[in-house]
Image: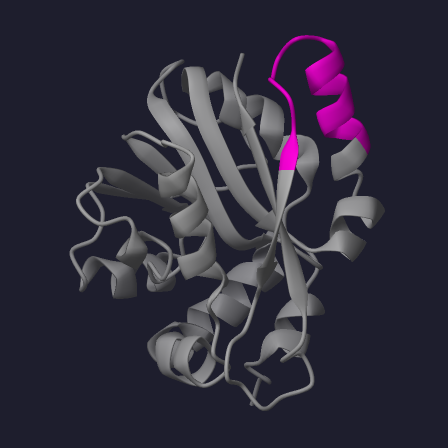
Amino acid sequence: MPDYDLDGAYAIAGPDKAKELYGGWAATYDSSFGDGWGYVAPREIASIYKAEGGDSPILDVGAGTGLLAEHLDGMTVDAIDITPEMLDRAAEKGLYRDRIVGDVLEPLDMADGTYAGVVSSGTFTHGHVGPACLAELLRVCAPGALFACGCIPAVYDGMGFGSTLAVLQARGRIGPLRFADIAIYEGGDHPHAADRGLVMIFRKS
């Protein structure tokens, strides 16, 4: 039986393993991880997006079961995730205008300038998606689009987000980069309960 927990998720490598793990976890993800671990990063990222004046439509990257979109009240949000089973669970909540099964590390079948913003929680982390997706996400966003994407410091350093974002800013592709420090969990009793996250905040130029 697979180990459906954070350490099991951190250990995956590649899209096939991601689909296997999250496909099996989808039915219990909200209760076993969202509630069971006190996973509040989606709430915190949504709050930052709204406080920064983010507009819609929004692309929720690695949307999963919709834990982030639950906090984007009244905004138009599309979901993209590599795992159909996770999006099926999100569909039951009626949160998204559209649910797209896709890999953001591949070219996206979307027109340039489609979105006014991008949000993400739990996707830019160990064993998951690195900064190679940023150029394509920028393409599908309109000028001025707001990005509020969660990461953790070890991944930010280890997967090259810092240098990628620095180059994008130096080339005038994005505006000034800022960060917010957030709690990832709240009220949980587990080895990661004190973990903190970074939210990368910037706008497309």
Asked if one can make out residue 136 in the rendered structure from this viewpoint, the answer is yes
Q: Residue at x 31, y 29 (%)?
A: 55
Image position of 122 (left or right of 67): right
Q: Residue at x 64, y 58 (%)?
A: 197
Q: For residue 167, which quarter of the picture?
A: top right
Q: Position of residue 74 (x, y in %)?
A: 17, 44
> Magenta residues?
163-178
Which quarter of the rendered picture does the C terminus lie within?
top right
Q: Residue at x 28, y 58 (%)?
A: 70
Q: Position of residue 161 (x, y in %)?
A: 74, 37
Image position of 33 (left or right of 170): left
The tally of labels here is: 0
When the figure is inspected, residue 44 is found, relative to residue 103, above or below; the finding is: below
Asked if one can make out residue 81 in the rendered structure from this viewpoint, the answer is no
When the figure is inspected, residue 135 is found, relative to residue 199, above or below; the finding is: above
Image position of 159 (left or right of 3): right
Check if residue 168 falls in the magenta segment.
yes
Identify the image's colour scheme: rainbow, by chain, secondary structure or one colour. Answer: one colour
Check if residue 80 falls in the magenta segment.
no
